[in-house]
Amino acid sequence: MVFIVLIAALLLVPADDLSNNNVWGQNGHRIVGDIATDYLTTDARKEIDRVLGHESMAIASTWMDEIKSDPAYDHTHDWHWVTIPDGMTYKETEKNPNGDLINSIRTFIEELKSGSLSAEEEKKKLRMLIHLVGDIHQPLHVGNGKDRGGNDTKVEWFYDDSNLHRVWDSEIIDDTQLSYTEFSAAINHPSDQQIESWQNTDVIDWANEAMELRDQVYNLPEDREIGYKYQYENRDLLDRQLLKGGVRLAGVLNEIYGK
Ligand SMILES: [Zn+2]
């Protein structure tokens, strides 16, 4: 019986789709949320506790992926990513009529600042903002317009079929076999100067950084078989992006809720 259920579940796995796959894995988001918790002002922390109740930022961070199974939230699918081709600025791009990662982050910051949302809406928007600040620090969320954020760049990850997006989403992180709290404890050591300079940036800077990382992220061997070497060459970058995401998320939330 279990076997039949497993087969059924496998058959239901959807084909690669940008809106379904273009996310950090759960642990990536939780690491960002967990790190951010450490850099909140006392006022911001109180306000976030008021909005989220007993839900931690790490737990709140994955809600926006969980709602993908609910058709009521179909309109949010394109908010997880943005396309900016090489050599273009966001301003110059043709905008997605369904919204995108950059304008969603901007909108939620403004709406949360306004203080005019109902308690239910405020909770939803805060959960989505926590999620999306994580997303924009996964370099392949800012797609080049050629391969659906790396989903169409097929690779072999330690001899298993995968794609570049999934490698950055979850494979490198999950292969460490660390829990999200163990992972964040290992990388959460920014200097005061890093905190200040990282927080002194906006969403366009974050997107531009992702674009600048493309050369490194797409530096693949011809046979597209990757494993230890790619992991070794990119682990520092991945750790840095998760740490920046957490520190910057705290900066944004302090601005919204810090009084
Ligand atoms: Zn996402």
Image (tube, helix red, strand yellow):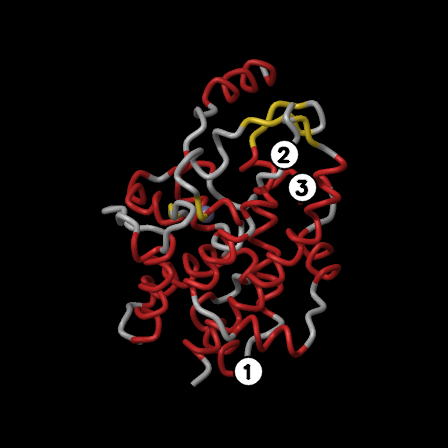
* Label 1, residues with CA under 10 Å away: few <14, some 14-19, many ≥20: few
Q: Secondary structure at mark 1?
A: helix
Question: Mark 2 or mark 3: which is in front?
Answer: 2
- Residue at the image point whose x is 30% and y is 41% from the top: 74
Q: Quadrant of residue 111?
A: bottom left
Mark 1 or 3, nearer chain start: 1
Q: Which residue is mark 2?
A: 220
**Left or right position of 95 against 250:** left
Q: What residue type is disc 1 on? A: Thr
x then y, percent, for residue 32? 58, 59
Q: Amino acid at mark 2?
A: Leu
Q: Is residue 136 left or right of residue 116?
A: right
Q: Secondary structure at mark 2?
A: loop
Mark 1 vs mark 3: give the one in front: 3
Q: Quadrant of the N terminus?
A: top right
x, y percent for residue 63: 46, 50
| SS category of the residue bearing label 3 | helix
Separation (CA) of disc 2 from disc 3: 15 Å
CB of mark 1 within 8 Å of CB of mark 3? no
Placement of the C terminus among the 4 image quadrants = bottom left
Q: Judge depth for marks 2 and 1 and give the one in front.
A: 2
Q: Is 168 drawn above or below residue 220 in the view shown?
A: below
Query: Which residue bears the numbered disc 1?
Result: 42
Foreground pick, 50 / 77: 77
Crowding at dot 2, Cα within 10 Å, few <14 / some 14-19 / many 20+, comes out as: some
State whether residue 67 is above or below residue 191.
above
C-alpha gap between disc 2 and disc 1? 45 Å
Residue bearing the label numbered 3? 172
